[in-house]
């Protein structure tokens, strides 16, 4: 997934890039809402999502863990827990400056967002849900499958920490 995202980013010619996972969907006003949020705040915009289990339910995701902390607390928060949702809008140059996507099967987005925030990119959140996050038993980012990726990402965080305080987080 990371390698494919890196190729897509290399071929992008627009200053802003919006991410959509292959099994998810945008509501009709998604880009409008994301661009309006970006116009107000810049940085990286994280979407609000509706959890979607096809044929069963659609609900808002729990707010706990998704609240965007103040800019001064974002690095610690993104290391502590991934408060950025997969549906992001970001400046291509900010992404490239942070090193872009790495060749990871899972967790490539969290890995990138940590590096972007470490580089000073501030995260803002869209004001209402516009992204359908499809939940399936075989999803890479849902349930126990993400634990292995989390360990790999945290290993990189520790190895690349810029100071002892960040390493402790």
Image (spheres, rainbow, N blue to C red):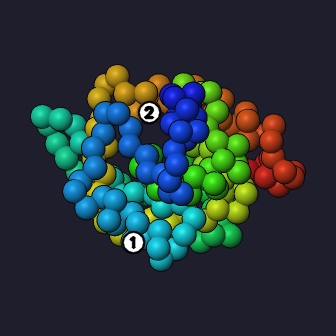
| Residue 101 picture location, percent across and down | 61, 37
| Residue 4 picture location, percent across and down | 51, 29
Mark 2 surroundings: few (<14), some (14-19) or many (≥20) residues within 10 A:
some
* Left-right relation of 120 to 148: right
Decide if residue 79 is in sight here: no
Residue at coordinates 34% horizontally, 59% vertically from top-left?
Answer: 31
| Residue 80 picture location, percent across and down | 63, 50
Q: Mark 2 points at which residue?
A: 141
Decide if residue 99 is in sight here: yes
Is label 1 in a helix, a strand or a loop? helix
* Left-right relation of 65 to 169: left
Q: Which residue lies furthest to the bottom in this view?
A: 40
Please tell me in which quadrant of the rendered image residue 128 appears. Answer: bottom left
Q: Mark 1 points at which residue?
A: 36
Nearer the camera: disc 2 or disc 1: 1
69 over 77 or under it: above or below: below
Q: Which of 62 and 130 is in front in this view?
A: 130
Residue at coordinates 28% horizontally, 49% vertically from top-left?
Answer: 26
Q: Which residue lies furthest to the front in this view?
A: 13
* Left-right relation of 162 to 95: right
Q: Which mark is residue 26?
A: none
């Amino acid at each position: 997934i990371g390698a494919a995202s890196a190729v897509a980013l290399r071929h992008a010619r627009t200053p802003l890039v919006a991410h959509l996972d292959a099994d998810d969907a945008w509501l009709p006003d998604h880009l409008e809402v994301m661009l309006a949020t970006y116009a107000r705040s810049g940085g990286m915009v994280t979407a609000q999502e509706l959890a979607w289990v096809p044929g069963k339910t659609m609900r808002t995701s729990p707010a706990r863990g998704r609240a965007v902390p103040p800019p001064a607390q974002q690095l610690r928060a993104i290391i502590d827990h991934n408060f950025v949702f997969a549906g992001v809008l970001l400046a291509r140059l900010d992404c490239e400056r942070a090193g872009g996507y790495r060749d990871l099967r899972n967790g490539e987005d969290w890995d990138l967002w940590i590096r972007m925030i470490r580089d000073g990119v501030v995260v803002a959140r869209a004001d209402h849900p516009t992204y359908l996050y499809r939940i399936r038993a075989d999803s890479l980012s849902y349930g126990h499958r993400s634990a292995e990726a989390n360990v790999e990402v945290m290993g990189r965080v520790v190895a690349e920490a810029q100071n002892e305080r960040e390493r402790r987080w």
